Amino acid sequence: MKRLLLTLIACTFLLSFAVAEDSFLAGTVHGLYRFTNGKSRLVWQVPEVRKILHDGSRWIILTSTGIHASGDLKSFKPITEGLPVKILKIPENGTKRFVREVQELKDLEIHPTNSKIMVTATKDAVFLTKDGGASWKSLGRSAATTGIKAVSVLDLPDTTGELRLTVLMSHPIYGISWKRPDVSNPSWIDLNEGLYSVPSIRWSDEVADMIPVTINGKTDLYASNTFKPNIYRLDWEKKRFVSVWSGNAPLDTIDGLAAGSKTLVFSGPSRLREISYTAEQNGTEPVALNNWNNSLSQLPGIVLSAWIPARISENRGPLSLSELWLLSPNRQQAPYTTDANEKKGVYLPVHQVATQEGFARHLETMKKNNLNMLVVDMKDDYGYIRYDSEDPLVCKKGTKGRGITLEPFVKTAKENNIYLVARIVVFKDRQLSRYADGKYAVWDKKDKKPWQGYRLVAEQQEVSATEEKTEPTYVRNYYDEFWVDPYSEDVWEYTIAISKELIARGFDEIQFDYIRFPTDGKNLPDAQYRWEEAGMDKESALMSFLSYARSHINAPISIDIYGANGWYRTGARTGQDVELLARYVDVICPMFYPSHFEQQFLAHKPAVDRTYRIFFHGSYRNAIIARNHVIIRPWVQAFYLNVSYDRAYYNPDYVQRQIFGARDSINQGYTYWNNSGRYEDLRPDIDCTTPYPWDAPQEAPRGIIPFFREDAGALK
């Protein structure tokens, strides 16, 4: 009787396991759904279900709030002990509360033969568990800068042939590295031979994903690129990657690798595809895979992940599909992207539109060039308020400078069908840094005053012919920048008061510039942030501010970022981590000024196409890094800078090539920048049918890439 009872229990367990793993699941921005008899049902409401795995007994689910485990799809337990958290500050009615959340996790993988072993990563470090997620241990990272993209874990042979636990990570700048956590004094070792590199850049381009695949008892590691159509297999013996397949498209993304029984399945813009593991030998191409589109397309919101059980995978075995947001590239998640899309315009200093005559002159320039957007300073680089504010808080804390009277200015703009963007310089603010004896200033902990960055320069010495030269004396040369504390909720409140007033009085969009921490100065270590709360860091300060802004501004919000932070998945030094900040805004405006990159950056032959390349690749890269949450509207260089490339090439063609580059990648708009308001170098805007007037660039041999067009998308 006892034996029969045990048998029944075992059979019940095996049946429940089989039923569990046999479930058809999908994760969206709203939660986890289960399909039964062709109909979907929400089984867990949670933000952004990004990956669904099964370890043999439990579901392991990666969400934007961390990793959770469930045995029955009814209760979900966080398994995050040892993973770092973010502390977000939320001001409410004169008080404040703090929210703890697990830091953004970039990836999650289970060991192919030992389900107790898993690996994940934040942007800062890789984390390993050997007890099924009960505890996690940091393995650090291989590079000095942040920005980890993908991780993997498997057993690989050492020099004696013995299999040893091996963890791999990919970095957006420095490529792939591996580490053996169980050996004495483990260290990260680079592993980049065979990987694609962008011409003129010595590092390997970003690897999107890595996955171990076991076939006939042999385990191989496969990898792919984020911005080019490349799939690789790792030749571990030779420590190099071998090309399995390389596509011809100048831009493409291969991510969300899933190990099928005979094919590698992967996500990309507008389509799910698969490729045979034998493609390396027989040269086969990937084929589209639309088998589950009808089911997934019925779900509300954007689909991010799915678990395809073996019973419906058509002999592919169970598949964990991820990065499925790529299948809907024309559907951004932010609330006001429709309003902000395809806006093309100029920045103007406010004094140039303060009179009807000055405004009329610039309106004529905009009409001549088919532009429909104007960005104008409402709080400028020195903190001056540049309009006739009536808000009590703004009038109390702000310092008014020469500006505009809003009502007639807005009326004229609307009569000319101009989309108005209010540029607000946020944390660089000389005026507010002086308010109330420096109450809001970034503080100099050594000099006990508002902090101001400086560099050391040699003092000029007059030395006669008979005198011996002495060691130079260095003096402080201060930057013309003053900063307020990004952690201060009072600074946030003041900024939002300006924003809300401008929207109420006719502006269409709020644009935050200098949404970052100071980065320059020999004395940067002396900068003290007196409003910093325990557990907060630079990213959480910016996230907290933008979360506060999002909850109070009922209109499009845009932010300006460094060009490098739009090109690479890293917010190093500034706190401008695109993946994190994209949660809270509608538009990101990378400053892809060719003059501001290293002068050899993308300057390979023909060098004249460099400005096209920067915008063609950069716009696409920024959209992918932001996971398509937002519109990407780059700043276009319409000014000359005395650097080598500009000296050789700057002219109206230089400017126009940037526009073609932005159009041919994602075509979501742009803004010209010229600090003096001089726009004689512009040419009329182009549409999708306008031919490239010079020799066709190497990057676009087949013309426009349709990934982000209105009619793109496998899942509408």
Image (cartoon, rainbow, N blue to C red):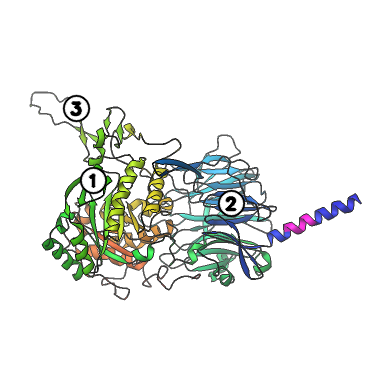
Measured from the top left, where is residue 318 in percent x and y? 65, 62
- Where does the image place residue 313, in percent across and percent down from the top left? 64, 67
Residue type, mark 2 in image: Glu
Please, which residue is most extreme toward the right here? Answer: 1
Check disc 3 and report the residue beneath it: 473
How far apart in space, not on screen, are marks 1 and 2 (Cα)?
54 Å
Q: How many marks?
A: 3
**Residue 149: image x %, image y %?**
48, 51
State the SS at label 3: loop
* Tag 3: amino acid: Thr
- Left or right: residue 705 versus residue 14 is left
Instruction: Please determine whether, in this image, residue 367 is positioned above or below residue 579.
Output: below
| Residue 238 visible, this orientation | no
Q: Is residue 120 magenta?
A: no
Whether 662 is drawn above or below 158: the answer is below
- Residue to which mark 2 is pinned: 109
The residue at which mark 1 appears reads as: 395
Query: Helix, strand, or loop for circle 2?
Result: strand
Q: Which mark is residue 55?
A: none
Question: In what element is the residue under mark 1?
Answer: helix
**Magenta highlight range:** 12-17
Does residue 485 appear anywhere in the picture?
Answer: yes
Tell me what residue is drawn at x 38 percent, y 45 percent. Answer: 575
